[in-house]
Image (cartoon, helix red, strand yellow):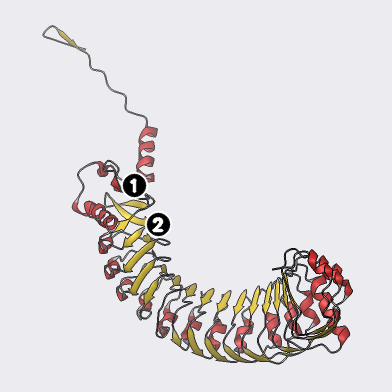
Amino acid sequence: MERKRGRFFVFVRARPPPTSFFLFLLVILSSAGLSASQFGTPTAEFDTDRLALLSFKTLVSDPSGALVSWGNSSLHFCRWRGVNCRNHDGEPRVTALVLESLRLKGKLSPSLANLTFLRRLRLGNNSLEGSIPQELGFLSRLRSLDLSYNHLGGMIPTSLLQNCSELRIFSLSHNNLNGTIPRNLSNCLYLRVIDLGRNTLEGNIPSDIGSLPKLETVSIWDNLLEGSIPPEIGKLASLTGLHMRFNHLDGPIPAAIGNLSSLTQLDLSNNLLAGAIPAEIWNLTSLRGLLLWNNRLTGAIPSDIGNLVGLDRLLLSSNEFTGTIPPEIGKLEKVSAVFLHNNNLVGTIPNTLWSLRNLDALLLRHNHLEAKNAAEWTQHFLDALTNCTRLRILDLSINHLSDVLPKSVANLSKTLQWLKIHDNQIAGSIPTEIGNLSNLTVITMSSNLVDATIPAALGSLRRLI
């Protein structure tokens, strides 16, 4: 206490806030990814991010009102919908712009390239159109670029792959992109996913795709790509998915694909590939999907197919395979779909097929399959629908199968929906017990030797199309 000029001054020492208060404040600021400087006068770099976002907004329409927060001048832009920020040198900078599935329409603004700290740009499943600005190639910190499921056109700018040392995901699928796949993929050493499916890309697959050691998925299906599959793909030790269906690829399947020990999905369907399946393919024990349908592939299906014990789908239809169906196919205990139709397979159906209890669909139509005798055919039919309790689709049409349909059809699987046995030599009458197949939606028996009389029991099949 001090006495001065008749006044008393009392000095009271203020008690500081507890340490926990400062910790709480620090957590709040850091969880928002912002610093206290955001409330002061922004620097030029800081304002650049805001202006880049506003430029983006001026070129898109927002019918669902997803960007309504972007018009709130009192709301910091780091809190706008889809915008994420982090502190860099004391300033909040935009590191992610995620505006997926918001019905946005319009064009991409080149000003997005001014978001120099951007790591994720995800604008998929909207209605964006026009070309991809080549300026986006300046985003050297970008790790994920996803512009899939839009209406973007033009060529893929080569600039996107010039400063891509950080890029992990490169997804431009389901657009209207044309031209070729850029030839500078080798710049993107950390790339894990290439997804360019469902476009109109032309030309060859660049061989430098084999120089990406981290690559896990290559999805370039449904384009206009041509030429052979580069054997350099066999160098991609981390590859799990190779999807190239619906193109114009020709030549043989490279034996080097057999080096991809981590491969789980191999889809080369609907191309112009020819020759035998390389023996190395049958050693890919991690494979779950082998899809090679609709090419001009030849040769026999080897007994080594039994090595693919993890296989879920075996689709080899519409080729020129010859020989018999190997009994080792019965080792594929996890397989749910076996499509071998439209080939030149001969001989009998191996009994081991009917041990596949996870089998959902079996298509063997349009081959030259037969039974040793009538009794064998009957047994096949019974085993198929008795043991394969999940079977929904059975198509044995256009073969050389004979004998009558057994009356014990009444005990058959209730899961069956499609039964196609037309264009064989099946004789006798249609058993009335077939009416017990309550889930049947399709049944075809034409071009056989069966009695033309249609049993009234078929009327109980209410789901028939």
Q: Tag 2: residue type?
A: Arg
Q: Tag 1: residue type?
A: Val
Task: State whether residue 287 appears in this view.
Answer: no
Left or right relative to 172: residue 445: right
Q: Residue at x 38, y 41 (%)?
A: 27
Left or right relative to 345: residue 40: left
Q: Quadrant of residue 146?
A: bottom left
Mark 2 burial class by Cα count in 10 Å: few <14, some 14-19, many 20+: some
Q: For numbered disc 1, what is the local secondary structure?
A: helix
Instruction: Tell how many labels.
Output: 2
Residue 79 lies, in percent from the top left, at 34, 46
Q: In this view of the protein, which residue sits in the foreground, 60 or 423?
A: 423
Residue 315 lies, in percent from the top left, at 63, 79
Residue furthest top as drawn: 6
> Could you tell which of marks 2 and 1 lies nearer the N-terminus?
1
Q: Which mark is residue 168?
A: none
Which residue is tagged 2? 103
Q: Residue at x 45, y 71 (%)?
A: 195
Q: In this view of the protein, which residue sits in the foreground, 384 or 299?
A: 384
Residue 162 lies, in percent from the top left, at 31, 74
Mark 1 burial class by Cα count in 10 Å: few <14, some 14-19, many 20+: few
Q: For numbered disc 2, what is the local secondary structure?
A: loop
Residue 189 lies, in percent from the top left, at 39, 73
Question: Considering the image in quadrants, where does the C terminus appear?
Answer: bottom right
How far separated are the C-alphas under marks 2 and 1?
A: 14 Å
Instruction: Kindly check if marks 2 and 1 are in contact, taking CB atoms under 8 A apart as contact.
Output: no
Task: State whether residue 451 appears in this view.
Answer: yes
Residue furthest left as drawn: 5
Q: Quadrant of residue 23?
A: top left
Which residue is tagged 1? 68
